[in-house]
């Protein structure tokens, strides 16, 4: 059943305005006050009928334009036990939000970012954010799932040296970061946190890959500085062959291949590799030189692959 009380009140105001030769504005449509002859409401439809000298009809809006939308993301999507993630969210047409799931229950702003406490056991954790509009009664939810890995089930090769850089950021597996197995996707971009005094790595296995690919580390506005990347069979290892490492100040690529392509870093098939990432000043390799205004360094990773 339609509630016409508000419409009748609106029409009464419109009539008063029209009587004073003021313009009438209903649902963003303007009618010159001098042109209005009468106003009535259809009892069945709830439409507002305005009779004017030219003659036209203005209809009541069926509903408030746009519904509630929620976007919730986590960075990174895969971490080791004892590490944390940063949740970032936004909404439209919402007046309030509530968190649930792995995220501690409580009220949240309609837009924001928050680092959650470290996760202490392996598994998958789902964070939920539900936002509502108190006027329309509409609501919607956003969810994101984070995978926590037990490092003891994925040991570092015994022949690897301890990295010179102290690791303060999170490591990731290729599948979790890109959503597909190496070497795909063929062309993609992701952002990744890097410890302000350490490094990060992406672990992958070459499998039966046959082709060539590349990596590019792009500077972000919050973390300016030189970016260093290296491909190695050991995490945190930047002391590799010249063709397997790159320092980005402009737009050079670090190219690799599994089929012997000349001038690229040669990767063996069926082997675990680490794409190690840090910031540097090219002087002291034992320290990271990220300049950041947000506590953590942020780098944009671009990757591409061509099957051959």
Image: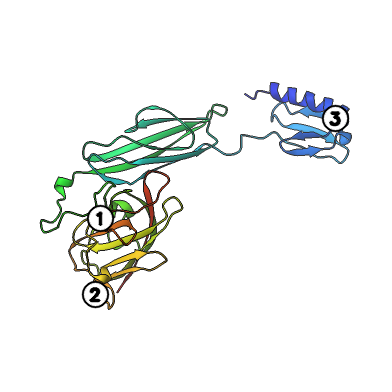
Where residue 77 sits: x, y (%)? 32, 46
Identified at 33% across, 46% down, the residue is 76
Q: Quadrant of residue 189?
A: bottom left
Residue on which disc 1 sits: 286
- Answer above or below: position of 38 versus 249: above
**Screen quadrant of the C terminus:** bottom left
Q: How many residues crowd around disc 2 within 10 Å: few (fewer than 14), some, or many (20 or more)?
A: some
Residue on which disc 2 sits: 259
Where residue 40 sits: x, y (%)? 79, 28
Where residue 36 sits: x, y (%)? 86, 33
Residue on which disc 3 sits: 18
Q: Secondary structure at mark 3?
A: helix
- Tell which tag, 1 or 3, sits nearer the viewer: 1
- Tell which tag, 2 or 3, sits nearer the viewer: 2
Left or right of 163, for residue 136:
right
Q: Is residue 257 visible?
A: no
- Answer above or below: position of 305 versus 234: below
């Amino acid at each position: 059943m339609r509630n016409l009380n508000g419409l009748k009140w609106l029409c009464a105001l419109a009539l008063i305005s029209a009587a004073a030769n003021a313009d009438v504005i209903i649902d963003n449509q303007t009618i010159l006050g001098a042109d209005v002859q009468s106003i009535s409401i259809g009892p069945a439809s709830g439409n507002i009928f305005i009779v004017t000298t030219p003659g036209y009809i203005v209809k009541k809006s069926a509903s408030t334009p746009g519904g509630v939308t929620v976007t919730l993301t986590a960075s990174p999507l895969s971490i080791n036990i004892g590490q944390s993630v940063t949740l970032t969210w936004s909404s439209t047409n919402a007046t309030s939000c509530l968190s649930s799931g792995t995220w501690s229950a409580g009220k949240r702003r309609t837009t924001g970012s928050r680092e959650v406490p470290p996760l202490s056991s392996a598994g998958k954790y789902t964070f939920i954010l539900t936002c509502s509009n108190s006027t329309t009664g509409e609501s919607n939810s956003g969810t994101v799932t984070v995978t926590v890995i037990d490092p003891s089930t994925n040991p570092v090769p015994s022949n690897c040296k301890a990295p010179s850089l102290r690791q303060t950021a999170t490591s990731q597996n290729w599948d979790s970061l890109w959503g597909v197995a190496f070497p795909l996707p063929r062309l993609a971009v992701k952002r990744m946190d890097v410890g302000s005094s350490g490094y990060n790595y992406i672990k992958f296995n070459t499998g039966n890959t046959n082709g060539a690919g590349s990596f590019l580390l792009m500077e972000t506005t919050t973390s300016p500085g030189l970016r260093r990347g290296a491909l190695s069979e050991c995490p945190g290892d930047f002391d590799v062959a010249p063709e397997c490492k790159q320092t980005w100040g402009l737009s050079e690529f670090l190219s690799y291949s599994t089929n012997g392509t000349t001038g690229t870093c040669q990767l063996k098939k069926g082997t675990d590799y680490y794409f190690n990432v840090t910031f540097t000043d090219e002087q002291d390799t034992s320290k990271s030189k990220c300049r950041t205004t947000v506590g953590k360094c942020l780098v944009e990773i671009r990757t591409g692959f061509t099957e051959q």
